[in-house]
Amino acid sequence: MCGIAGTWTLRSEGNGANGGIDPSMVTEKMVDTLVHRGPDDHGIWVDQGVGFGHRRLKVIDLDGGRQPMSDPDNRCWLVFNGEIYNYQQLRDQLMLLGHTFRTRSDTEVLLHAYLQWGLDSLKHLEGMFAFAVWDRDTNHLHLVRDRLGIKPLFWMRQRNRVYFSSEIKALLQIPGFQPTLNPKTLTYYLSHYQSVMGDETLYQDIYAVEPGTVVTFTEEESHQNPSGTLNMYIARYWSLPVIPDHDREDRGEGYYKAKIRDLLARSVERQIIADVPLGAYLSGGLDSTILVGLMAELGVKPIKTFSIGFDDSQCNEFAFSQLAAQTFDTDHTEIGINAEEYFPAMEELIRFKDAPLSVPNEIPLFLMSKVLKKDITVVLSGEGADELFGGYGAILRTPMDYQNLNRFTGQEREEFLNKLSLIYGCPDFNDEISHFRTVYSWLTPAELSQLLLPDYHVHRNGDPMLQYWEQKFQPLWQLLPEDRILNILETVHLSGLLGRLDTTTMAASVEGRVPFTDTELLEFVATIPLEYKLRWRTPEHQKLAEKLHCIEITENLDITKYILKKCFQDIVPEPIIARRKSSFPVPLDDWFTGQYRDYAWQTINNGKVMPDVFNMLEVEHWFQNVHSTNYGLKVWMLMNISLWLDIYFT
């Protein structure tokens, strides 16, 4: 696992020798900000306006695999962050095609795969990756990101210069660049707590390479500009399969159980390969317990596992993680934390992320990564299981709110609408997308308009949030309503969780791996009918659900992640199988109505940039309204925003 950065300056822009920006200097400066991603080694290569930089965390082939790496003829140069899990099979295949290798590293395999197949090599790769290739023959710079966006990659263009990096902080080192807040993405963050919207970030002119995408830059000459112009092309090389439920052949529960078990076991087997100590997060939930169980079946000894929670027993899941650890005889570490550790880590993690945090449990994950780094360098984590197998029952059942409301008339409709208002505050049932926005958002458009100053009201020029969701839903109308949301969770929600994992692990120089995101598993699960993911307990329960809302339905009348639970019920303890879905507990309401109330307000109110962006009278009104829905979460969000704005925009 690593950090990468680089630049390409066309001849027309000049370089350090003739008054332009020196690519060697700027590459060195950028890569120096990424030491936490790669404390073990670093390298720089610069030639004719191209600069590549690399920070390495040694995981595979500790003595080889130095980067930037080139082929013997210096045709192509590569900087790569991630792991290619099938690199040994690809290496054998490439050797049969005449390639020779100097190292045992997956980096060299990736380079030779590109030399053999070009960008078609991407279809051969299984892993998590973000990399840049400079192809001297074609005069192309390719920026590539893995299918789900497990590994980050950002870029920025200034006229005929382009810069890229694993993290935004490196791009902020570019001489003369002053970051500017992006109002559209700020609104997206306040609504959904994600800092990247499509390819847009919270910073104007800084973009993300989207998952499953290649961004190519090339120099093209013309009569108008014989010295060359920098052109850019974006191509998607992979998308999650969209298969209507009526086109999915029902092959039976036994077949699905066997296939899922085999695919996930193979994914874990590939991902436990490392030349450094390895372990796993163990929350005591279904997903992490399955991964640890498979590690045990594969003979990993000892299995080092880690869980974290607050010292208050009501705010931890230690009873379940202890049960799982005992079941598989792991070398288990419990980490207890409190508010005195939590709040100082907030600003520290914001500086690593270059964005406000996404969810309150991001900080415990960061603190846990710091502790486990003393024992291991690679950790397996369960992200992806909920999105693939239907773990978010409440939001998956929200289409029934919309459907059930339309079944009622008169007084019954009025009563049901009042019931929904208690859940959502102000439900929007004009159409399915509007309803989804309501249930998936923390703040409504009306609340955003009250909270933000007029210069940051993005709805003055249409509704970019609505346009964004219409674009996401457009290819999904052939699916069942629940399947549409499942697809959105897999393609949008999951990317936020994977970004959280990358930040919290790499900040501590730890590599996080996610076996549930295996491509073959993803594509197979897309063929499984919905009823195997989200199953009614009985036909009677399904009928009863027609009069209830999603909260009353989920995990009472149905079974979430049905096939995954069935698949591993022989190794996962029954109390963990039977657990209701719950998020990591953080006692925000207790803190912000009690001992840490003044601290929270000082953090928000003393922010130097907050008054330039927010209506502080409305912010204070929010802060005083302790009985509002999600009060603690709203205060936490405003603290995050205030800290982030002062760090990056003062």
Image: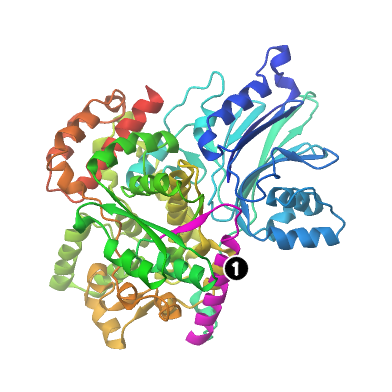
Residue drawn at x 80%, y 58% is: 94
Residue drawn at x 30%, y 35% is: 344
- Residue 493 at x, y = what percent? 42, 55
Question: In the image, which residues are magenta?
Answer: 252-281
Looking at the image, is 359 positioned above or below residue 232? below
- Residue 50 at x, y = what percent? 72, 29
For residue 422, which quarter of the picture?
bottom left
Toward the viewer: 438 or 309?
309
**Is residue 262 part of the magenta span, yes or no?**
yes
Toward the viewer: 308 or 629?
308
Quarter of the image for the C terminus: give it: top left
Residue drawn at x 56%, y 51% is: 211
Looking at the image, is 80 positioned above or below residue 221? below
- Residue 438 at x, y = what percent? 30, 55
Which residue position holds label 1?
A: 520
213 vs 300, left or right, is right
Q: Which amino acid lies under the numbered mark 1 shown in the image of this protein? A: Glu
